[in-house]
Image: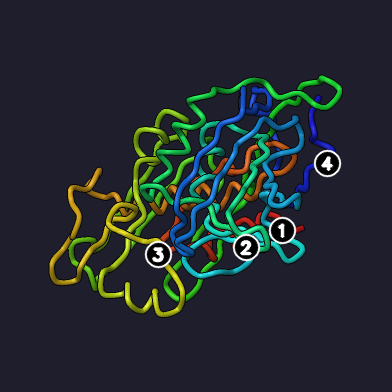
Amino acid sequence: MTAFNSLRSSKLVSWKPTGRLQQTLANCVERRGKALHSGKDSTVRLCPGFAGEGRYFDYRNNLIPASIDFVQVSPLCTTLCKNGFRLRTVEHLLSALEATGVDNCRIEIENSDTEEHDAEIPIFDGSAKEWVEAVEEVGLKVATTHDGKHCEKMAAHVNEPVYVWRDDSFVAAFPSEVGKISYGISFPQAPAIGSQWFSTPSMDNLFYTRQIALARTFCIYEEIEQMRNVGLIKGGSLENAIVCSASEGWLNPPLRFDDEPCRHKILDLIGDLSLFAQFGNQGLPVAHIVAYKGGHALHAGLARQLMRE
């Protein structure tokens, strides 16, 4: 069976079978760590989900779907919000789940403050490596509905060019037979980063695991004090980000890739576009996605454009 009749289609996309069944985790797996912005510890438990239910968070018995419908604008991360409960920095986890084929998943979050309405996903080393390893630890299985049926996995194919932009930054999706991403960044204030471009071939699990998931988040050293003054990166350190100084270059080498910052932007993009997923189907659209100097807000903006009737 498929959830095709329930899909939120638009003139911009056509939903087509992928030739695969929806999947979920074979068992539960748990990770605990410190959050980047709040600096607080939290525990995340990934559990199998039923086919057609997609990915969703369970925080204090409040269910928050991993959907573009619940994205709230926030600086330097992607935040989901529903009924007064907020979950920050979901992008690395969702990127790993989307790329490794965990289509349906219940994501339970716990932190020490039982009255807190906000929670944040641990940052670990700043990449998606820990989440990919968590998925590999328990493996995948075919997901079933509550009555034991399977669901065919569908994917959205982009029919015509669509884009969002702000100043000299943009994210666009062009029709393509296969899904691929080209991303450009420009940091003239930090010559060690400078201008970079990275393009993926057709995206698959193996390429993501080896070439994208390992790329860590990055920041400019001279901007750290300003970010901390507005309550951000309280948990940031040289262990969970690569830091570049305008004058001194990289402060905690070696890099995992020469273009690690650019690859990390692709990691973020996949996580943000995973929020386009509906009913356990593929979130990342089948298109050639081209981005330049993008960020979480523009990534989410493209997902919203693709939802447009």
Q: For the C terminus, give its image quadrant.
A: bottom right
Type of residue at label 3? Answer: Lys
Instruction: Please tell me which residue lies in front, 11 or 33.
Output: 33
Q: Which residue is mark 2?
A: 118
How dense is the environment of label 2, judged by Cα within 10 Å: few (below 14), some, or many (20 and up)? some
Position of residue 52 in the picture relative to residue 35 (left or right)? right
Q: Position of residue 269 (x, y in %)?
A: 49, 52
Position of residue 288 in the picture relative to residue 119 (left or right)? left
Q: Earlier in the sequence, mark 3 or mark 4?
A: 4
Separation of residues labelled 2 and 4 (CA atoms):
31 Å
Q: Residue at x 47, y 56 (%)?
A: 35
Q: Earlier in the sequence, mark 2 or mark 4?
A: 4
Q: Position of residue 260 (x, y in %)?
A: 29, 49
Q: Residue at x 61, y 25 (%)?
A: 27
Instruction: Please tell me which residue lies in front, 6 or 261.
Output: 261
Q: Which residue is mark 4?
A: 6
Marks 4 and 1: in contact by CB < 8 Å? no
**Label 2 vs label 4, nearer the camera:** 2
Separation of residues labelled 3 and 4 (CA atoms):
34 Å
Q: Earlier in the sequence, mark 1 or mark 3?
A: 1
How dense is the environment of label 3, judged by Cα within 10 Å: few (below 14), some, or many (20 and up)? many
Q: Earlier in the sequence, mark 1 or mark 4?
A: 4
Type of residue at label 4? Answer: Ser
Q: Which residue is mark 1?
A: 69
Tag 4, which secondary structure? helix
